[in-house]
Image: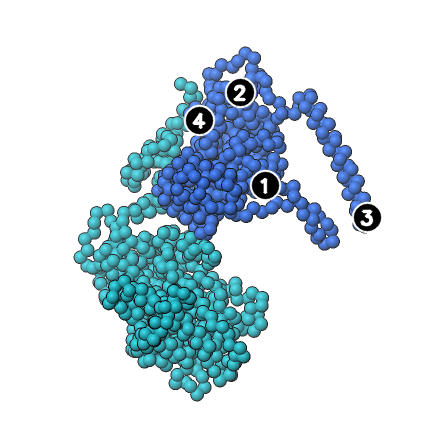
Chain colours: A blue, B cyan
Amino acid sequence: MKHRNMEFWNRMSRHSQLGNKLVAMAFALAAVVGVGGQNIVNAQVTAYVDATIETADKAGRLEEGILVVDGDTIVDVGKDVEIPDDARVISLDGKTVMPGIIDPYFVYSTTGAATATRTVVFRGRTFVIPVRPTATPTSFTKIGEYFYPFNYNFMPAVRTGITNAQLVSPGRGLSAFANISDDRTPEMLFEKDGRIFSAVTNQTSSLDLLRKPLAAETKKTTSSKPSTSRSSSSTDTKKYWEEIKSGKKRLFVNMNTAAAIAYVLQIAKEHEKVKFVLVATGPNLYPLLDQIKSLKNVEIILQPGIDTVPYTRDLMNVSRLLAENEIPFALSISLSRSQMNSNQDDPMFPVANLVHTGLDRDLALKSLTMKPAELLGISKTHGSLAKDKKANFLIFDGDPLTTGSRLEQVFLNGNKIHEN
Amino acid sequence: MKTSHNNNSFVRVLFALLALALVTTMTAAPVAAQSKSSKSPAKKAEKDETDKDDEKSDSEKEEKPEYLAVQGSDIHTVTDGVVRQGTILIKDGKIEEVGNNVTIPEGTKVIDATGKIVCPGFVAISMRSVGLRSTPSGANKLKDSLDPFDQNIKYALGVGITTGCVELSTSGRFGRFGSPQVENTPGEPADLFPGLEEPVEERLTEQMIDYGDLNTALCPCCGLPVLPTEPIVPTRPSTAKPRKMSVIKLAYGNVGDMLAKEEVFYNPSPGALNGALNRHNWRLEIKKAKDAIQAEAGAAKEAAKKPTSSKTTTSKTSSDKSKSTKPSTSSSSKTKKPKANPAIIKLLKGETKMRVRSDAYDEINDLSDLAQEHGYELVIEGGTEAWALSEKLSKAGVQVIYTPRRRREPVDGRENNSGSNFESPMIFENVGIPFATSTLSNSISMNGLAGRDLTSLPLEAAFAVRGGASERTALESLTIVPARLMGLGDRIGSIEVGKDADLLILNGEPLDYKTYVEQAIVAGKVSYERGKDRVYPVYERED
């Protein structure tokens, strides 16, 4: 029995080698012929015409607008836009174009060490399974240095229409900004030094990870942080904390209980200059809306969806409540991994549902595009369809903010990277 | 220019909605609508459109003024009688004024409590798993581990508990009570001896009877009786490790208001002071602490000649002892200082009280003697047979944490001074022993038989009335007495000017089983509303 199994595996591996070769050949061919799609940089200027364009910018919604793209950049957007003579013109009659979704808090497992394996014996059989070493909660992970482009979560993100994301780990560290595609190359990262993020619970040890660096004196010398991190990286980290303390960059804090949010709000009250971005769920935010409202330095990231009021069976739309209380917020579709994975061609369904139950339509659109870009500090290049911005956009067969509209095409930096 | 027809219609709809919303909100919150005209126009439209069903945030906006008044109710102040149809004015969470002629400043939020009864919030002297999910361990502090959104807070507030004393360490016999998840862990005595999940004391007394009640101690680890045996090798003196207790206020949603006192009581395990050896160890500890106090006083004396004996308010014997030991210790203290337990120093200085669980006559007797010998304040928790020692305890100033419904069978032939006595509350009242009421189980339980857990606290006090105590004493046993036991008598436990505004608005007499808490105010903020929170039924009684 065992012997036969061995034989089987040997044969399979031989097959797979053959298969690999075939795939490689096919790719080479594709590259030559030019069917590779995403790898080709558009040499030509392309004009997308006849579409309804949701710019998520000052221009607002444009009926029968024109979007001109040169390479990876938007040359012009509008109704009366000159189309260059040599431009390729693509008609998107009846379609709606919106900016690519920017996910401000894409929880991405920490390491590239998913290649590590462990041999497990289960019911007499031996399995070799990939192991992800669990990062200790206090360890500071720099996502940019441990980027692993083969993460399987990028696949559903692409078909969800997420074109850019801030990659974070479940613990704390320094994030990185990525173009989400099937490229699987380290070049997916367009900003390796992102923002400091931290998951926080209501425990002294966890809260001190925020309190201490925020309370530390702003000195030029490297003395105030006697943590375990290496000297070079600790000075690095200090630099990032300085930027946060001066209010240049935002601090991202993820909390899983209402109590933890209450403690972080206390910290936010003490440090008025520091801009906090709280990542939390609707039911945990709900009892704290008033406290959040009273603080001007707090913004929210939550997942789109209808929640239940804690300890009741009443439904609520927390995004709408945030809007009513004038609390700035962005939506992160990836926060609900199951929701993102189950998205096939209607990724906007949960957001459309929020609009259907009272969330302002414009606000909903911006909370997926422009607001996250602002939170990440990349709103000059991303987040809306405007001149000189990156050509990241989605094409829907109807209004993306009504339930039932389907995502048809995803463009990243001018290239079509996904089509339904 | 560039807007299309569709876009125009969209804008028109928006304006129509805006106008409609403005009309509806004009009466409700015109100021709020004006002040919020910032940011993006889309946001503003969104705001106006949805403002009309924004009742919750509106009602909470009104709480922002620092003044709050409760008007028209009969106020049970506990320490100063009843004020009929009086008004309580609260400023910044503290009681500013109480009486019949209270001028209410402009902009005060007024709660109309006409026909209602107001009394101070109840104090649970033993509370578990309310306001914190898990007990903090290691470097984690209680200050950072509170959960102001724990639903148990609502259950507790629903019966009027606004403050509670929580035990932070979970070891020992006492930790098992009231926590069903721990009861049946494999290997626990409850597994080995079926039936042990019932309160252990009852079983133990029977076993003690079998062994002639030879002052049997309970094992501090497993809670089983330790049979008195002669030690073959005397064990090294060790400290009776007390359990840490803290006081938290049930300020729902306000972490900042929750921690009332980090450390209360010196709370050794029940067996720690039992038996000759333990008592010897305890005396050694006391001696060390007294020496430390003396050294401290000596150091102070060196600075200024005369002022002495202000800190050591202990009995004559201790001062005698100190005189004899002083020259030796003060000289040696610099070289090989015996480490005194700071908690015991606090205890001897009268800053905290000792709280011990004890039910048996002899045990209480010994503890009382020990307390008098060393001059610290003693609180007996349990005290089932304390009634038989009432005169003595009263003279010794011992106080009791009592559960009127707890029963215990008398020992054959010792009926005159053993077993529980239903009249205990009356006896305590008559001889002047202040007692606090505690419940049979100190957590909030959502399974099993109702009426035994923390939510039965007022009911438990009503049983003290049934046992002959006056209603006033019973109410005191829920408010001012536990507050004083915890050293918080100046902050909570009664309605007095300057105290924390922890109030209950009741729809009947405080101890009546028919009474519901209509609103609970903690630190000047409404933390519970019967109509809103739906923890207890919402209806009007017809009688």
Residue highlighted by disc 2: A69
Label 2 sits on what residue type?
A: Val
Mark nearer the viewer, 3 or 1: 1
Q: On the rendered image, what quadrant is the C terminus of chain A found in?
A: top right
Q: Is residue B249 visible?
A: no
Tell me how far mark 3 sits from mark 4, CA to CA: 66 Å
Task: Tell which subunit mark 1 falls on.
Answer: A
Residue highlighted by disc 4: A57
Residues at marks 1 and 4, common chain?
yes
* Numbered label attached to residue A3: 3
| Residue at 30 percent of width and 36 percent of height | B35
Residues at marks 3 and 4, common chain?
yes
Residue highlighted by disc 1: A111
Residue A27: x %, y % from top left:
69, 27
In the displayed orientation, state which residue is furthest to the top.
Answer: A85
At label 3, counting other C-alpha atoms closer than 10 Å, the crowd grade (few under 14, some 14-19, many 20 or more) is: few
